[in-house]
DNA sequence: CTACCATCCTGGTTGC
DNA sequence: TGCAACCAGGATGGTA
């Protein structure tokens, strides 16, 4: 589930339930996520008030009243579900459960355990190993055409691989890279460094447009759910190329079918005619 | 520095 | 219906 739009959707769902609230009870069941939970994680969260929830790339950053930041990455299968009432039904993959002083509870569920959490002082955030090297936020003012051109300049890897690299642009994943490239009319296979000028500007704009549309739709739900409410996101119905191998290209109206190719071990979907 | 590959883990789907 | 192979939203660390 989680690329930038899904993480943003989760943050928006968590804010009204967590901001200003005290984490009254914290339970951890499996500490062995992608990285082990920090030592004394539950004890250090318990009793803290959440002052603010931010997102950076695909990270959820909850600022606490003791100057610490609680960081969560959802990995491939992580979910945050918020509900009211007692949290008695425990799923096999519920790894962290938090009850707030308002009686709500937040459950972190992660089947594959590729996600992880951390707890560190806010003042050292800029130096955090997971955050320090991230590229610009695609929805911020930084991602202009010229900036993107500079970021891609000289790179010989494929444009697809470059856009998946969080050091170049932060927050994109497999689905939205495919969608943005289609929208921009650029081939995922072209060398990243070949994108400049007007093409770079169009790509930057396409990335923003695709992400914004996905956020407006509550993200994309694959198989089960995304949003903290348990509601489905519905952007998966708006995918133009992702997951549509063999279907008619919506732009050239079926002159050419959408192709699936494998790039650095991951599926890429594109129209060879409309994307050059 | 860059690019490619395997790897972490579980479960759903597909094909024989 | 059984079972194996393959596939999946991410990211890293090792190797060449």
Image (cartoon, coloured by chain):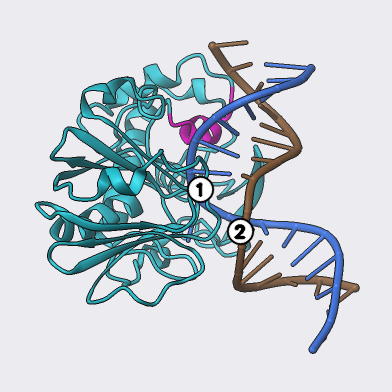
Chain colours: A cyan, B brown, C blue
- In magenta, the rendered stretch is A157-166
* Magenta stretch, overall SS: helix
Which residue is at the front of the view, A160 or A71? A71
**Residue at image point 49% right, 41% down:** A36
| Relative image position of residue A80 (x, y in whole percent) | 34, 60
| Relative image position of residue A200 (x, y in whole percent) | 37, 28
Q: Horizontally, is A246 left or right of A177 in the view?
A: right
Residue mark closest to the camera, 2 vs 1: 1
Give the vertical position of B13 relative to A207 (above or below): below
Which residue is at the front of the view, A190 or A52? A52
Badge 2 crowding class, 10 Å Cα cut-off, few under 14, some 14 to 19, many 20 or more, is many
Using the image, tell me which numbered label, if any, was put on residue A33. 1
**Residue at image point 40% right, 46% down:** A183
Looking at the rendering, which quadrant does residue B7 occupy? Answer: top right
**Residue at image point 31% right, 26% down:** A145
| Relative image position of residue A197 (x, y in whole percent) | 36, 22
Using the image, tell me which numbered label, if any, was put on residue A257. 2
Give the vertical position of A79 relative to A176 (above or below): below
């Amino acid at each position: 589930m989680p690329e930038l739009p899904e993480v943003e959707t989760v943050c928006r769902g968590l804010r009204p339930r967590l901001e200003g609230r005290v984490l009254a009870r914290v339970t951890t069941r499996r500490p062995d996520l992608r990285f082990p939970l920090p030592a004394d994680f539950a004890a250090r969260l318990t009793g803290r008030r959440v002052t603010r929830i931010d997102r950076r790339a695909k990270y959820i950053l909850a600022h606490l009243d003791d100057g610490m930041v609680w960081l969560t990455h959802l990995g491939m299968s992580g979910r945050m579900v918020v509900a009211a009432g007692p949290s008695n039904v425990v799923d096999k993959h519920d790894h962290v459960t938090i009850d707030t002083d308002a009686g709500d509870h937040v459950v972190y569920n992660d089947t594959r355990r590729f996600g992880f959490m951390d707890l560190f002082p806010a003042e050292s955030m800029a130096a955090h190993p997971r955050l320090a090297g991230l590229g610009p936020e695609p929805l911020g003012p930084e991602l202009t055409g010229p900036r993107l051109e500079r970021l891609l300049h000289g790179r010989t890897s494929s444009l697809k691989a470059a856009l998946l690299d969080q050091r170049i642009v932060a927050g994109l994943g497999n689905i939205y890279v495919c969608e943005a490239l289609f929208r921009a009319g650029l081939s995922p296979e072209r060398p990243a460094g070949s994108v400049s000028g007007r093409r770079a500007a169009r790509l930057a704009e396409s990335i923003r447009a695709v992400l914004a549309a996905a956020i407006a739709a509550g993200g994309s739900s694959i198989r089960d759910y995304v949003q903290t409410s348990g509601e489905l996101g519905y952007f998966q119905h708006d995918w133009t190329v992702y997951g549509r191998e063999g279907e008619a290209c919506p732009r050239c109206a079926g002159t050419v079918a959408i192709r699936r190719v494998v790039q650095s071990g991951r599926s890429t979907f594109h129209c060879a005619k409309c994307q050059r």
